[in-house]
Image: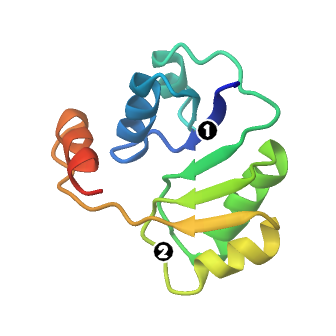
């Protein structure tokens, strides 16, 4: 069975630990995307696939409309079957994304202390 392709959008204090855990598991073909291209180069990320199975969203939410627009844009580009929102968002955002992306969408809020990448990885493993 082929590995599922997973894209993590936003390689900050939440996205980077999620990306590393996915990669370390060996169960997924993991990719990372960030507006800061240096973060992608640090992961030896040269190209991104045209389509992914799962897309994690780990970006700030400056406003609901702007956040939804960014997620919809990424969804159109990468055509995921499932979008997982790992960001803190206002009520109704997940449903709004679902209506506009026409794929499965889940909100999975991140619990834990954001001290460092390694600490956050342990927190992500601890809070199931």
Q: Which disc is residue 76 wearing?
A: none
Q: Name the colouring of the figure.
A: rainbow
77 w.r.t. 38: above or below: below
Element type at mark 1: strand
Element type at mark 2: loop
45 w.r.t. 121: above or below: above
Residue 111 screen position, x and y as percent: 26, 62
- Please name whichever residue, 33 or 126, is drawn nearer the observer in this view of the structure: 126
- Please name whichever residue, 37 or 9, is drawn nearer the observer in this view of the structure: 9
Q: Residue furthest front?
A: 1
**Which residue: 80% across, 72% down?**
100
Quadrant hosting residue 6: top right
Q: Which disc is residue 89 wearing?
A: 2
On the rendered structure, is 26 left or right of 54?
left
Mark-to-mark CA distance, 1 and 2: 20 Å
Mark 1 burial class by Cα count in 10 Å: few <14, some 14-19, many 20+? many
Mark 1 / mark 2, whichever is N-terminal:
1
Given contact means CB atoms under 8 Å apart, are the residues at marks 1 and 2 in contact? no
38 w.r.t. 105: above or below: above
Residue 61 screen position, x and y as percent: 50, 67
Residue 107 screen position, x and y as percent: 51, 69
**Which residue: 82% across, 67% down?**
102
Q: Residue furthest bottom?
A: 91
Name the quarter where the C terminus is drawn: bottom left
**Which residue: 60% across, 79% down?**
93
The residue where tag 1 is placed is: 7
């Amino acid at each position: 069975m082929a590995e599922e392709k997973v894209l993590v959008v936003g390689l900050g204090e939440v996205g980077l630990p999620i990306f590393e855990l996915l990669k370390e598991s060996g169960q997924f073909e993991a990719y990372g995307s960030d507006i800061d291209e240096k973060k992608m180069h640090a992961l030896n990320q040269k190209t991104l696939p045209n389509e992914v199975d799962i897309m994690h969203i780990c970006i700030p939410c400056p406003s609901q409309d702007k956040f939804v627009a960014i997620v919809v844009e990424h969804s159109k580009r990468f055509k995921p079957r499932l979008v997982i929102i790992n960001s803190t968002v206002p009520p109704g955002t997940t449903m709004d994304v679902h209506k506009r992306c026409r794929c499965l969408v889940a909100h999975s809020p991140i619990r834990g202390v954001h001290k460092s990448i390694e600490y956050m990885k342990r927190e992500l493993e601890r809070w199931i």
